[in-house]
Amino acid sequence: MSKIKTKQELENLRESGKRLARVLREVAKAVKPGVSTKELDHLSEKLIREGGDIPPFKDYVPYGAKYPYPACICVSANDEIVHGIPGERILKEGDIVGLDLGLSHNGMITDAAVSVPVGKVDARLTRLLDKTKEALWAGIRAAKGGKRIGDIGAAIESVADREGFGIVRELGGHGVGHHVHEEPYVPNYGKRGTGPILKPGMVLALEPMFNLGRDTVRMMPDGYTIITEDGSYSAHFEHTIIITEGEPEVVTAS
Ligand code: MG
């Protein structure tokens, strides 16, 4: 497994990203009060398999996990930051929900996430959603060939600092493509000009997670769901990008 993907691998990755964006858009449209998180999982699996593709999160065993991940999508509501397991929970008006999905097409995996409101939500939550998305795009713009991993984190962090949001520090972006998680790790904070150099052909998933309250997090007893320690609401956005000589190519943008 090399960090720099071949031309053919990048072709398959682009198609993978396009398909993932389509599925994620459909699943986001299905979010409304009264829908269970399990229904969102069934929908994402159906749409991925209809296209002849594979949901790579299903049965994936992340480092340190005690059992394989049991669903296709992660659905994380309110104070849940990431890795919420779909189940009987019913979404209600005023919730915010993060949808994190992977897709494998011809062996190439892409990874993307959006956070969306359920019906009408508080203005503070709308701002949290808008600014976390803005931070993702600030990170993407900073991810130019020849720059460093720390430039991405610094760009993301500056948005959270300006807004007074907590930044999740235990989790971050990562290489992706042949596997769900590859090197390098991409923290959502950092110093400009530090860390590994970004080289054209590298594929990264950038994924800021911002909290309305403090930075600190806690793991739920299910061994997957990460929540904010102070109970504050959290948002998460993610895209898979290809590093180029200039601005990166965002393969999961719809
Ligand atoms: Mg990811």
Image (tube, rainbow, N blue to C red):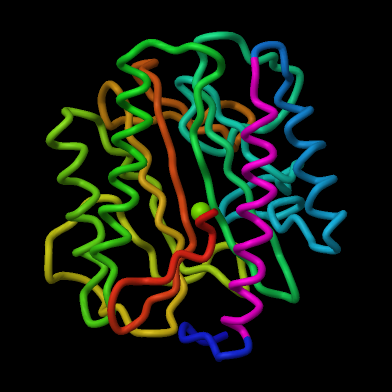
Quarter of the image that includes the C terminus: bottom right
71 and 7: which is toward the camera: 7
**Horizontal and vertical percent position of residue 224:** 59, 37
Query: As rendered, which of 169 and 139 lies closer to the eye?
Result: 139
Where residue 178 appears, x then y in whole percent?
62, 75
Does the magenta stretch mainly form a helix, a strand or a loop? helix
Quick one: quadrant of the N terminus? bottom right
Reply above or below: 157 against 161. Answer: below
- Location of residue 34 (image quadrant): top right
The residue depicted at 17 percent of the width and 30 percent of the height is 163
- Whether 35 is drawn above or below 182: the answer is above
Examine the image and state in which quarter residue 106 appears.
bottom right
253 vs 231, left or right, is right
Residue 31: say if magenta. Answer: yes
Q: Where's residue 54, x and y in %?
A: 79, 60
Q: Which residues are magenta?
A: 9-32
Left or right relative to 237: residue 142: left
Q: Give the left or right position of residue 119, taking residue 213 as reference.
A: right
Residue drawn at x 34%, y 33% is: 130
Residue 48 vs 119, above or below: the answer is below
Q: Residue at x 22, y 73 (%)?
A: 148
Name the image quarter holding residue 194. Answer: bottom left
Answer above or below: position of 190 versus 134.
Answer: below
216 inside magenta stretch: no
Number of marks: 0
Question: Residue 104 at what x, y percent from top left?
Answer: 71, 65
